[in-house]
Amino acid sequence: MTSVVVGTRPAADPRPARTRPGRTFLRLADLLDPGNAYAQDVDGIVVRDSDGVHLSSAAVEDVMAPALLSEIVALGNQTR
């Protein structure tokens, strides 16, 4: 079985996922807070809601979803 393990905190440790065959690790903080620093926008995409804390819909649709889909497709291609 292949799977994507998603880490939501900057300190999320990818090692447990990497030690199990067929797993890959996607740290969302790397996408949303490049360089481990808070970001209101990433590559021109506003990733924080107006409160500055919660994620915007663009963060999910334009940043997180494509990265997650890419990982899922890559895993699917490995199993062929």
Image (spheres, rainbow, N blue to C red):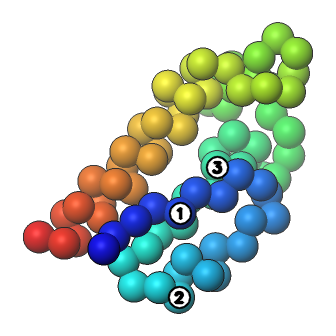
| Whole-percent x, y for residue 24 in the image | 46, 69
Q: Is residue 22 above or below residue 49?
A: below
Q: Residue furthest bottom?
A: 19
User: Would you call the spot at circle 3 few (<14 residues within 10 Å), some (14-19), or many (20 or more)?
Assistant: some
Of discs 3 and 2, which sits in the foreground? 2
Separation (CA) of disc 1 from disc 2: 12 Å
Evaluate whether residue 41 shows in this view.
Answer: no
Pick whichever of labels 3 and 2 is earlier in the sequence: 2
Q: Amino acid at mark 2?
A: Thr
Residue bearing mark 1: 5
Pick whichever of labels 1 and 3 is earlier in the sequence: 1
Kind of element beneath mark 2: loop
Which residue occupies 47% across, 85% down? 20
**Quarter of the rendering occupied by the N terminus:** bottom left
Q: Is residue 39 left or right of residue 29?
A: right
Q: Amino acid at mark 3?
A: Leu
| Whole-percent x, y for residue 69 in the image | 37, 45
Q: How many marks?
A: 3
> Which label belongs to residue 28?
3
